[in-house]
Structures are given as structure tokens and as C-alpha cells.
Image (cartoon, rainbow, N blue to C red):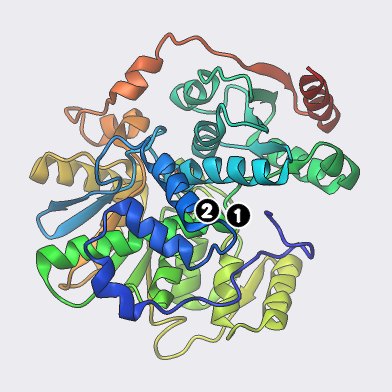
Amino acid sequence: MGLATDGGLLLPETIPDVRNRLAEWRSLAYPALAHEVFSLFIDDIPSRDLMQLVNSAYSSFRHDEVAPVVPLGRTNILELFHGPTLAFKDIALQFLGPVFEYILSERNEKLTVLGATSGDTGSAAIQGLRGRQNIEIFIMHPHQRVSPLQELQMTSVLDENVHNLAIRGTFDDGQSIMKSLFRDLDFKRDYQLGAINSVNWARVLAQVVYYFYGCYRVLEREGGESVTVSVPTGNFGDIFAGYIARRMGAPISSLIVATNENDILSRFFTTGTYSRGTVAPTLSPSMDIQVASNFERYLFYHCGSDATKVCALMDEFANSASLSVPFGPDGVDSGFQAAAINTEQTLATIAACYQNHGYVLDPHTAVGVAAAQQLAGSGPSLCLATAHPAKFPDAIARANPDAPATHPILDQLKGAKTRCRVIDAKEATVRETIIQTLAG
Ligand SMILES: *Cc1c(COP(=O)(O)O)cnc(C)c1O
């Protein structure tokens, strides 16, 4: 279930306290740790089945550790990009695929997933759901407005249940067509429409695991009690998982909200006011977001778990494009720090890291590393690496023309056979395409 029936977002009734398990979890491999964390939230899948789902999810990763920590001097990098599409979204979507398939088969149901993408999410969703029983997936991307690599990552997947729709319009057109098809309750019911965007709680849950895993590795290496974690942030989904991990008792001292010039979230944590700006394109396109869908979940806890207060604040935001919370001596929340990093700082961070360590940061990760350099202080710290640099060769070349930015997975795509339908960005056309495709 994506949205709740009242249009809000879903949260678990309680967040488990795992402080007495921390020592025992420390030695677990990634899949075993994931199984422990998921078991605390999932009580309707038998433990053995859940372990199988977890194993099948993470066997597609190209690194034994799934999410290894790489030390670069005082900076530790948590590499979250070893999945099939080379971005951290695989960690959740590789798990969601087998889980959806399992639940649909239990219930003898079918699902038609419909999504709109500006790039990364679409390919991670397609890779998570390709070839899965009882699932058809339709992904709209703006025709000729995603990078050629991103387009190939989607359209070169030839499984019969994968349907790429290039719409003659923008990402926003795709998003609004999607919303209006979801509002048509008859269509939604008749075609078992489902979503897998970042408001899906299972995606947040899957991301909680690597905060534990990464902090353990840093503390093993550096000693100490807790870790400052810097997170390149767009929709607040990734860092919200870190917030949940911290509430559960993960050894996180503070979370750094690292944004690019689209800084609505860093402004919120440094002023107490959340106000919409206009979206500016940057080198880190997956963070070019002004309204962060998972922010509402954080507000719930910030308001002392008072849903009425959250509704009032969200109404305030809907009416005036701005909302404010009290700003105390500790700022908005002593558990968060925030910084906005501009293009020049991003390029300088990529260049310096390559010169000093021979390591190439992707532009999203560089935003997080730059923010950590400003804010993390002298204790142990960890920066989340959300994508492989080969996905963003132009930014890497601008920062440092000598730095390599290739990956065999992407090299193999060149010249690959593709399948994609180019259609008008009209609700009726998309609806008709779905109906005809499902009719076979
Ligand atoms: C999606 C994405 C982000 C932003 O994550 P949120 O959960 O939206 O905050 C950062 N980096 C990359 C590479 C991404 O694909």
C-alpha cells in the first residue's frame, strides 16, 4: 500500500528498541542483519521464507558485503551502489520485487505497477520487478529528457512484463498522469494498480539495515561509541531510514542532511521553516527536489506523534507553500545538522578526493562528503555513497578529466537491443496503452 486512504503516509505503530541486541548484531553478515531488522516489523511472512526473500534480494549485488565501507583517510564511504543499476535505490527495490511476488502468489492476486521517473528510480524499479510472476510494470519517462545512459538502463530490459513508455512531455507530466490514473478508483481496482515510489514504507525499512551495518564497520575500525552519518538527500527517504535506525538504538550521534542548491530541507533544519522554492537543475539530478515526500513522516515524530498537528502543518504547507516549527537553542532537532552544497563545492570535492585518494565520488556522494567536511567534527563519521560515478560521466569529467568514470555494466549497454513505446503525454493515451497491453 502506497498512500494511506486519507492521503497521508503510513508508519509502524511502534518503533522497536534494539539497544540490547546491538552487540549480538555486530558480527552478522548483511543478509542476516537485514533478516533481523525486517523480522521486527514483518510478522506475516514466516521467518524461513523471509530469509529466502532477503537472500534472493541481495544475491544480485556484485560485492560480497552488499554495502562495504571504504576508508579514505578520516572519511569513511558506505558504498550503496553495488546493485544492478549502480544506485542505492537497488537496496530497497531488489527486496521489494521478491516480496511483492511472494505476497501476490499467497493471495492469488495480480499487480500492475505504474510509475513516472526522471531517471534513477525507473531503472531500479524495472530491475527489481523484471520477470516477476503476476506483475506488469509500466514506467513513464520524459522522451529524450533523461540521460542516454539512464534511458538505456530502462529500455534495454526486454522481459515481457516490462513496459517502457517514453512520453512526449516532462517528468511532471508523467507524475500528473500517474496521479490522475490513481485517482480513478474504478480503473485502479479493475487493473490492480500499484505504486513503488519512495512513499512505500517497505522501501524505507529496507534502507534501515545499512545504517546499522555501516556504523558497525566504522566503530570496528575507529573505536568510539557512535557515528555521525552524512546523507545526500532529495526526497528524505534515505535519511529518514537513518532517523528510524537511530530511534531503534543504532549508534548514530547525528545525521547530516546534505542537499544541493535545492535546499528546502537544509533550510528547514537550520531555520525551522520549510518553504517551497523553484527546482534548479544541478550536477546531482536525483536530489533536484523541492517538496520531499518523506518529510511528513519525520514531522509526525517531531510533533510528538500527534497526527492532528501533522495534518495542521501539512494543510498550512498546502495553503501557503510554507510551514514553520519552533526553533529552540538546539535548533529544530539536536539529532540533525544540515548543509547545502553548490556546484563549485561539489566539483572541488570530487577533484580533491581523486587527487588525495585516487577515489572517484559520484556528484550526489560528493555533496554528502562536502557537508561532512563542514559539519562532522572529529569523531567517527560515515558518508553514504548513493551512486557509482560511472552513471554521471559528464560531472566527473568536469571535475577532473583524468578520473575514470566507467563501469562494465554500463559499457555493455552500448548498442544493446531496446524496447520502448513513444506516446503522447496524455492521460487517455497512457490509459489506453495500459489497457491494450494487458489485453495482450
Ligand atoms: C534517489 C537518490 C538520492 C536521494 O535520496 P532520497 O531518498 O530521495 O533522499 C540521492 N542520490 C542518488 C544517486 C539517488 O538516486
- Label 1 crowding class (10 Å Cα cut-off): few <14, some 14-19, many 20+? some
Residue contact at pointers 2 and 1, CB within 8 angstroms = yes
Q: Left of 266 or right of it: where is 222?
A: left
Residue beneath disc 2? 203
Callout 2 secondary element: helix
Closer to the camera, 438 or 299? 438
Residue beneath disc 1? 200
Q: Residue 335 is drawn in which quadrant?
A: bottom left
Tell me the kind of residue under disc 2.
Arg
Closer to the camera, 49 or 80? 49
**Could you tell me which residue is drawn at 69 percent across and 69 percent down?**
317
**Could you tell me which residue is drawn at 54 percent across and 62 percent down?**
42
**Could you tell me which residue is drawn at 57 percent across and 20 percent down?**
159
Q: Answer yes or no: is residue 282 visible.
A: no
Looking at the picture, does residue 331 appear above or below residue 83? below
Callout 1 secondary element: loop
